[in-house]
Image (cartoon, rainbow, N blue to C red):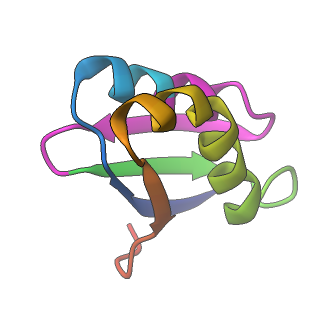
Amino acid sequence: MEKETFDVLGMTCAACQAAVNRAVVKIEGVNSVDVSLLSNTMKVEFDPNQTDVDTIIEAVKIQTRQMMRKVNSIGVQPSSKKI
């Protein structure tokens, strides 16, 4: 298992937090997801043989596309910190 921390910018409410969580938790190979509205971060534990960082980022972008139009923008990128 690999652990990665992502900066998730633009989350403004619990609905955004839940949408980001839903997007990632359903990816095959993802073991756990912890999305923090307060710190605008997401910690993901995943099997690198089944998924990767780019797939996780793309899933957040696709799932939150509707919310992005309403809230302006939700951006996600790998954090400089590994966990």
Please check the rendered image and state whether residue 40 is part of the magenta-colored stretch, yes or no: no
Q: Residue furthest left?
A: 38
Q: Residue at x 86, y 50 (%)?
A: 50
Q: Nearer the viewer, residue 79 or 8?
A: 8
- Quadrant of image for the C terminus: bottom left
Q: Residue furthest right?
A: 49
Q: Residue at x 57, y 27 (%)?
A: 66
Residue 70: image quadrant is top left
- Taking the image as shown, residue 44 lies to the left or right of residue 16, namely right
Residue 36: image quadrant is top left
Which residues are the magenta region?
Answer: 20-39
Residue 10 percent across, percent down from the top left: 31, 48
- Taking the image as shown, residue 31 lies to the left or right of residue 43, namely right
- Taking the image as shown, residue 1 lies to the left or right of residue 9, namely right
- 55 w.r.t. 21: above or below: below
Please check the rendered image and state whether residue 22 is part of the magenta-colored stretch, yes or no: yes
Residue 46 percent across, percent down from the top left: 65, 49
Q: Nearer the viewer, residue 45 or 39?
A: 39
- 65 w.r.t. 79: above or below: above
Residue 35 percent across, percent down from the top left: 35, 37
Q: Residue at x 55, y 49 (%)?
A: 45
Residue 81 percent across, percent down from the top left: 34, 77
How many discs mark residues in the rendered view? 0
- Taking the image as shown, residue 77 lies to the left or right of residue 42, namely right
